[in-house]
Amino acid sequence: MRSFSRAVFTCILRVLPLLVLPSIVLASGGEEGGWRSIWDLGWRIANFAILAGVLFYYARKPAVNAIRNSIESVKTLLKEARESRKASEARMKEAEEKLAGVDKEISELLESARKEGEAERERILAEAAKALEKLKAETALAIEQELEKAKDILRMEAANAAVALAEEVISRNITPEDQARFVTEYLEKLEANQ
Amino acid sequence: MIGIVLAKRYAKAVIDLAQEAGILKEVGQDLDRIADLFAESHELVNVFADPTIASRAKEKVLSEVLKKGGVQELTMKFIHVVLQKGRILGVGEIARSYRDLSDQLENRIRARVVTAARLDDNDKSRMKDALSKISGKDVVLEVEVDESLLGGVVAYMGSQVYDGSIKNQLTQLKDNLSKGR
């Protein structure tokens, strides 16, 4: 407060010569008019001093408060700006650190993905090979079974045909003597079976 | 049809009485004749199977039939009991059970012999002797001719089968050929 008052006072002292000096210069223009001019200047200075005093008296507190508030506000802003800057710097540092780690992480992820992909590829290839082997074996078995089935059918058909032919030949050529011989042989076997 | 168990129960009942009376064979013959009669006459079966015909009428018909057949008194009474029990259509099964039981009682066995050609008496006699020696029982031969055997003989005795037919040999040959042996 005191410093402000001193500042206002200093300001008045500096401005006052600027206001007074032209009047002195003008007053020095003649003998007669010189006293009048000095008198006039004296009134003006007194008038100004009163005005300045009134102004100083009434405007001092609001102006001081406004300026003080302004200063506080600026200080607060400055403090916040500094804190914000610090926080930003911290974040930036953190981000830079992360960024530095991200490259490594990315390369690790890429490597891991590559390895997993390789392993998956190997696994798929192994499974495909296994499935192929199984399919081959099943196909071979199916072929073998079909062949066996076809052979069985052929054998059965051949046997049926052979036996049908044999029956036909026997029934056509068998004689009563043959029948008698069959019965005799049967009885001999039956008697031997006792 | 009355089932083997029930038929045996009826046969056992009558066979005991027949054995006591000493008419085992006669009652057996009566039952066989009656069974044959029912097997051959569908009209008779229809009459006894018809639930709308009164029991008394059925008994009257049965009495007439049995009198004409000249069956034993025991057989007549037994058949009437069977009729009253509603089992008359199972007389064939009862007759077969009676035959089996009487065969057991008299140490007898029946052998069904199937041949491709007719057997002469000498062959039959040899067959009977051979089967008797195998079974240790008196054998009653029932001979049939079946030309589909092509040649040889098949004898069925109890649960045993003695198959010496050409047909059987050809069947075995076919099996062996089919199996690639």
Image (cartoon, grey):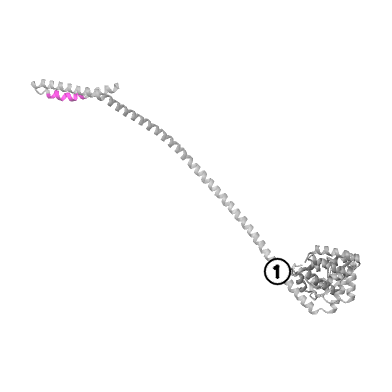
Check the picture and name the quadrant holding the N terminus of chain B.
bottom right
Q: Is residue A179 left or right of residue A134?
A: right
The front one of A85 and A110 is A85
Q: Percent position (x, y) of residue A137?
A: 65, 59
Q: Is residue A55 left or right of residue A32?
A: right
Q: Percent position (x, y) of residue B119?
A: 86, 76
Write down the region rendered in magenta: A15-26
Q: Percent position (x, y) of residue B145?
A: 82, 75
The front one of A59 and A87 is A59
User: Mark 1 — on which chain does it sit?
Assistant: A
For image coordinates 74% across by 72% down, the residue present is A160
Q: In this view, does A1 lie above or below A164?
A: above
Q: Name the residue under label 1.
A: A153
Q: Residues within 10 Å of mark 1 (few under 14, many from 20)?
A: few
Check the picture and name the quadrant holding the C terminus of chain B.
bottom right
Q: In which quarter of the image is residue B168?
A: bottom right
Q: Which amino acid does label 1 sit on?
A: Ile
